[in-house]
Amino acid sequence: MLDQRAQTAGSTTAAGQITKIAVLAAVAALAVWAALPLIGARAWWGLAVEAAVVAIVFYTYLQRRSIPLKYLVPGTLLLIAFQIAPVVMTAGTSFSNYGDGHRTDKDGAIEAIIAAGVQQTSGGANYRLAVGESASGELTLLLTDTADGSTWAGTEEGLTELDGATVDASGAITAAPGYTVWDLAELNERQAELAELAVPTGPETGIKVQGLSAFEGTSTRSYDEGCDCITDSETGTVWYADNEEGSFLTEDGQAALVGWRVNIGFDNYLSVITDPDIRGPFLGVFAWNVMFAAGSVLFTFVIGLGTAMALNKPSMRGTKVYRTLMILPYAMPSFAMLLVWAQMFNRDYGLVNELFGLSVNWYGETWAARAMVLIANTWLGWPYMFLISLGALQALPTDSLEAAKIDGATGVTAFRKITLPLLLIALTPLLISSFAFNFNNFNAIQLLSGGNPFPAGESVGGTDLLITYAFRQAFGATTADYGFASAVSVFIFLIVATISAVMFRTTRSQEDVY
């Protein structure tokens, strides 16, 4: 009875009350801090969501009842924020043409196209130019006004003043908080990207790059709302808005520099199915993806179970030392170990070729590269399987094993008929989780092989998984296509969910049998 009253009353100690007040005060302060930029951006939906979350938190922790709810709310909110919300946002992006050339809205596209036609005029500001990228990867002009030395960041959205920038003797920005500044070599290599960037500063004015400097001038282009078109008075070119594709096009189909983000329905999904240039590589990557995930689970499980059975014998000496050595690969940072393995498979001076007297081009031959990533991933993954297999072996019911021995089942027969089925009941959910992890094992491919080898003229590598393929579409290609990459990500989600559901149903069938 006393326990029930304590649960109903909640914590009434002074320390508990002080802790609760401190936590709720921190939540309130964080909410105010997050609300200010939302109000400034007029993001009323975001503000409403934030207010609802804060109200739920205060309602939950200010009352003395509903003790289980106090434990469920934090996990639920984190699940929504870091799992459900990203999935919803990714699915929403997959129905759009969002990517390079289609990052902004229509008004922003109009401003950028007009800014691209800027011609220098007397009295306009002049800038010393540096180029960089923001933390989100957005191309940015880092400008120093030659008149007063003020520093600015210029994007497709316009100019914003830049605080805390470091400027060299010539006036060029060499470092800026939140930006990665390009060096001269990168600037020369990526001139094409820079040429496409237009920075508007007004309805008909903008910033234009000229060598290592930039200037503000007046555009020769103007927008006519009546015809929904942009006209260049100097060349006579007219671009008409295509609101379905999100682009301004000339009569012969030539697109203007910048488009805008629009909903394109299922086009990204249909292109995977109907476009032969995409369907073929996609299916090839998918087939290898399944092979890689299944092979990784199979090899790690077989080796892990074998070593666990060897070390589970009571007569085995030095088991503590052996177990410590076995889990070393699992204890080491995987990204560092993958980089070490990448050097070990080097054709010219790698340890693998030197040790076995081989001359295999591990990065130049598709199946050699696939064998390489499977070998390295097996080495990294089998200690995990060893640990869970050893735990499952020690938890097996001894009466079933003794009964099997009495019935004459020993050795391979006992393992196949008794031990393995009992192990699979406990380990199948973990094997399914391992399959799902390896199906999306971005690090193993990106750090070890980088997707290589790439056939001539192809952007899909022989060891690419769907996750690295989607990453390259979004960030690694010459032009980013976030909409298509999001569609591929949704395909990955559906594939893994379907395979996992089938496997879990099989697991329930095993439990019913045994």
Image: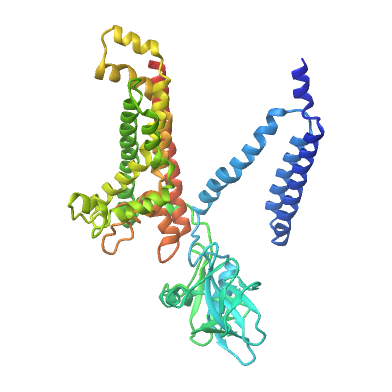
Quadrant of residue 228 within the rendered picture: bottom right
Outermost residue on the front side: it is 318
Left or right relative to 2: residue 313: left
Along the viewing direction, whichever of 379 and 273 lies nearer the viewer: 379
Residue at x 57% of width, y 45% of height = 82
Quadrant of residue 412 within the rendered picture: top left
Vertical side of 219 occupied by 246: above or below? above
Outermost residue on the top side: it is 406
Along the viewing direction, whichever of 379 and 325 lies nearer the viewer: 325
Along the viewing direction, whichever of 362 and 66 lies nearer the viewer: 362
In the rendered picture of this protein, how many numbered marks are placed on residues? 0
Residue at x 38% of width, y 33% of height = 321
Residue 260 visible from this viewpoint: yes
Query: Residue 108: horizontal and vertical position, in percent?
Result: 59, 69
Vertical side of 211 occupied by 159: above or below? above
Residue 227 visible from this viewpoint: no
Query: Residue 265: horizontal and vertical position, in percent?
Result: 49, 53
Outermost residue on the bottom side: it is 122
Structure colour scheme: rainbow
Left or right relative to 509: residue 139: right
Along the viewing direction, whichever of 335 and 445 lies nearer the viewer: 335
Residue at x 28% of width, y 7% of height = 407
Query: Residue 9: horizontal and vertical position, in percent?
Result: 79, 26
Vertical side of 474 occupied by 206: above or below? below
The quadrant of the image that shows the N terminus is top right
Query: Residue 322: horizontal and vertical position, in percent?
Result: 36, 33
